[in-house]
Image (tube, rainbow, N blue to C red):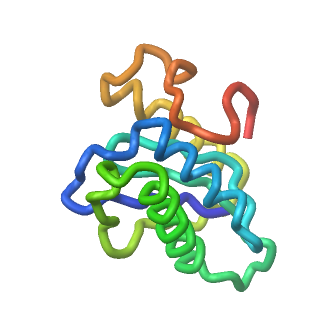
Amino acid sequence: MYFLTLCVKDRRAVLANETAVAALRTAVARLEHWWVYAAILMPDHVHVLAAPDDREAAVGNLSGALKWWMRMEVCRASAPLAQWEWQPGSFDRLLRSEESAQAKWEYMRENPVRAGLVRQWEDWPYSIGFRERQL
């Protein structure tokens, strides 16, 4: 399993909205060789926990696909919101155990709380995947 972070260029706060979360859902649904366990949109970045069907799959293909399809969906849905770009590249880490994946999920879900956006992680509406169960 991989922990992946994609950032918006110049850290513009354009992702914490219904249009972006719908775009993320659409992008995830279009993936063919990756299983997304959870993802959370922050104002200027997205965190994803995902695993490939094939151990040899390149994580760069996942990040490229998510970026491409999300931008296409956001542009289609709302031209004013489309005036942003992704930062080149991504941050990814191969997780080697279920414990490590659980720790990353806990980090992800608490991110909006640490940023002062909500009081409890359950209140953050811009996530997909796990909400209340163990990873």
Near-viewer residue (112 or 86): 86
How many labels, in total? 0
Residue 131 against residue 9 in the figure, above or below: above
- Name which residue lies at 56% across and 35% down: 106
Name the quadrant containing residue 71: bottom left
- Name which residue lies at 41% across and 30% down: 112
Picture quarter with the N terminus:
bottom right
Q: Is residue 41 visible?
A: yes
Residue farthest to the right? 53
For this view, does 72 lie left or right of residue 86? right
Residue farthest to the bottom? 56
- Name which residue lies at 54% across and 52% down: 23
Q: Position of residue 55 (x, y in %)?
A: 75, 79
Picture quarter with the C terminus:
top right
Near-viewer residue (116 or 97): 116
Q: Position of residue 100 (x, y in %)?
A: 62, 50
For this view, does 74 lie left or right of residue 55? left
Q: Position of residue 22 (x, y in %)?
A: 57, 45
Residue farthest to the top? 119
For this view, does 64 lie left or right of residue 116? right
- Name which residue lies at 70% across and 65% down: 30
Near-viewer residue (11 or 14): 14
Q: Is residue 107 visible?
A: no
